[in-house]
Image (cartoon, rainbow, N blue to C red):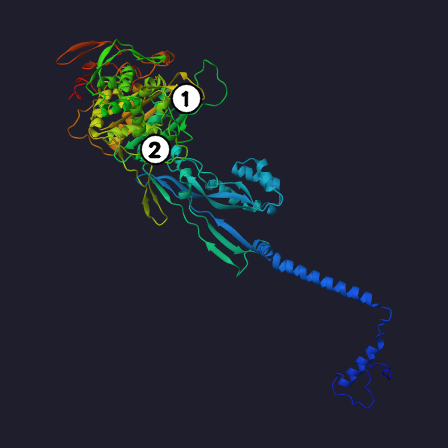
Amino acid sequence: MPSPVQGPRRASGAWPAAAGVRRSRTLLPSPSERRLRREARAATIPDLDTSGTTPKRLRALLLLCVLVALGIVGRLVELQVRQAPELAERARRQLVRSESLPAERGSIFDRAGRDLAISVQVPTIAVDPRLVTDVRAEAELLSSLLNVDAAQLEERLARPGAKFAYVARKVDEQAAKRVAERAKDLPGVFSFLEPKRFLPADSLGLSLLGRVGAEGEGLSGLEYQYRDVLAGKPGRLVTERDQKGREIPGGRIEFDPSARGDDLVLTIDRSLQHETERRLADQIAATSAKGGIALVMDTASGDLLAVANLVAEAPEGEARPAAEEPPPAPIIPATKNEAVTNVYEPGSVAKLITVAGAIEDAKVRPDQTLSVPNAIQMGDHLYKENEPHPTEDWSVTDIVANSSNVGTILIGQQLGKERFDSYLRAFGFGAPTGLGDPGESAGILADPADYTATSMGSFPIGQGIAVTATQMLAAYNAVANGGAYVAPRLVRATVGPDGTQRPTASTPPRQVISRQTAAEMTKMLTEVVRVGSGTLAAVDGYTVAGKTGTARKPLVGQRGYEAGAYVSSFAGFVPAEKPQLTAMVILDQPTPIFGGLVAAPVFSDLARYALAELRIPPPAGGLPWTVARSVDAESAKGVGDVGDAGALAAAQARSTATPAAPVSTTTASSTTMVRAGTRPTTSTSTTTAPAGAAARAAPTTVARRSVTAVTRR
């Protein structure tokens, strides 16, 4: 091959023209020049000497290249096929942000649509720790603005790697305003709105409504029971954001709005609920009781119009000298709806079932006379009256009006244990009421096969069995409702976000005793209020039917009863001629201990207010009106109301009742001198109110008929 033309370059850097080739007029080299240049470059590259390379080395090199290629392909398959979903999800998480949109919690209203519990938007203060420049300075400033411990704030502001931390949740508007005014001194601190449960009537009905947690979840009461109904459905917002959290223009956006929770419409009347809690709190304080329960029910429907659960909070603080009077305990709502969760031995109020069952089975008649001694032996136990008396010939009505233990036990013996148990269960004892409270108790009843020799001495007078206040209220309501048991109801309806109202299903009533038996029981119960142990339950211008109870309090976790501890109660309905309202009042360890002295007056106050509030007039005709009057302490005790005279001694020192003097009772047919503490069967009596008893605007002398006359046929 001829040697390439070698020679000096021209100033322009171009190669000299080959011989016989005419120069182009342009500055670009001609094709022949480009060919010559390529040949010149190739001549300068030395030939590759492969004489020393063996085929084995070439094959190894080739194999290595194949393996590298296979590794690359395998990795690609791993990334693009096997790990593709995971990598796609990681990429999505880096770009796509999904935010939960909390649903607005449904409200709770009373029967008239008045607010009981609502949700409002309130400010929450938070911080992005990554943006905080001076942890200590900001913590101290926030502490002064929000009244939060500076050390806790410093820990939250200095959390390593955290993007979010709460400073103070659900603060008031003034606190949020103070923080906003110092925003320039608080880099990284910001605020946003969160829903907070708000009770317009403060703590009214709190034990019933329940509490809500910081995250808006129901913790107790109706808030927990109806948590799925009230909570609603959370929404979702999906956006694409860059590494700094900024939304990518034109990126993916998905918006699924939240659905508001349903509202609850209760059967509660807010005005009556307020009055019930106020009256109950006053009596708890006045009697130094540990707590109390009060319920008011619409007789026909079973709707609960008021449910009060209050306790006397034990005072805390420094120790005081023994001689110094302790401060009164504040009365606060109980932590749960004790009217359905707590059981107690009802005592004499449960005599209603014993007597009603015996009359229904035709074992006794209201005007039937029984010989009632002062005591009766049942097995190894001697049952006595609270007020000792000689053997008396009392009618069944007298036994009920006088709250005689021995007389009720005699009636229970005639009824028999099997039928007695069947009536207890028919009246709703031993089973939940159907209100649906997760903590509701069914009560405690023994099986008749397990009865002992003393069972038919204790159970008929309300000892040895346990019921809830709502169960006992429903039992009295059955008598008021003509013998038909109506299940209690607390939630009237639910209301959807669109305003659609869905009434809650009601349980059909069931007849437990005949209307005739219910009428007989009503007449006997009116005598309890007219001349018996429940005279302080009377309401001016209305006939009241009811029964007192004073029961011993069992020990917790062991057999026996707590010395000197009693639960006092009164249950009844009004107007007796055509019942519209049924109510029950229970006081835990009051002083004095008798239900006729401490629970009956509260019933009277509640009934009077409810009758006026609901505009219930006295029915025309029917039974005679009960006239509110003063009453002596002995008259309100009942012959056997305490249940066991041997246990009464421990409580006598706590009672401030003053014994009454003998009174003369007169009718057209007879005149009888009555010993203090006994019950007149016929009377025109003059009674003296005890010290501290609530004053009644009524005459002190009231003409009365024979107790048995109204029920004798």
In the rendered image, residue 90, in percent from the top left (x then y), is placed at 59, 54
In the rendered image, residue 453, in percent from the top left (x then y), is placed at 35, 16
Question: Please, is residue 310 above or below residue 143 in the view?
Answer: above
How would you rate the neighbour count of disc 2 (Cα within 10 Å): few for under 14, some for 14-19, many for 20 or more?
Answer: many
Q: Nearer the viewer, mark 2 or mark 1?
A: 2
Please report the residue visible at 62 percent of the width from the left and 60 percent of the height from the top. 80
Please report the residue visible at 42 percent of the width from the left and 38 percent of the height from the top. 224
Q: From the viewer's perspective, is 561 left or right of 12?
A: left
How would you rate the neighbour count of disc 1 (Cα within 10 Å): few for under 14, some for 14-19, many for 20 or more?
Answer: few
Find residue 547 and report its image quarter. top left
Label 1: element kind: loop
Q: Give the Cα distance between marks 2 and 1.
A: 35 Å
Please report the residue visible at 31 percent of the width from the left and 41 percent of the height from the top. 505
Question: Mark 2 near mark 1, Cβ–Cβ under 8 Å?
Answer: no
Instruction: Identify the residue under disc 1.
Output: 328
In the rendered image, residue 443, in percent from the top left (x then y), is placed at 37, 27
Which amino acid lies under the numbered mark 1 shown in the image of this protein?
A: Pro
Question: Please, is residue 127 above or below residue 67 in the view?
Answer: above
Instruction: Identify the residue under disc 2.
Output: 433
Q: Is residue 49 visible?
A: yes
Which amino acid lies under the numbered mark 2 shown in the image of this protein?
A: Thr
Question: Please, is residue 636 above or below residue 444 in the view?
Answer: above
Find residue 118 and report its image quarter. top left
Label 2: element kind: loop
Most extreme residue toward the left is 668
- Residue 49's disc is none
Q: First in sequence: mark 2 or mark 1? A: 1
Between 367 and 166, the one nearer to me in the picture: 367
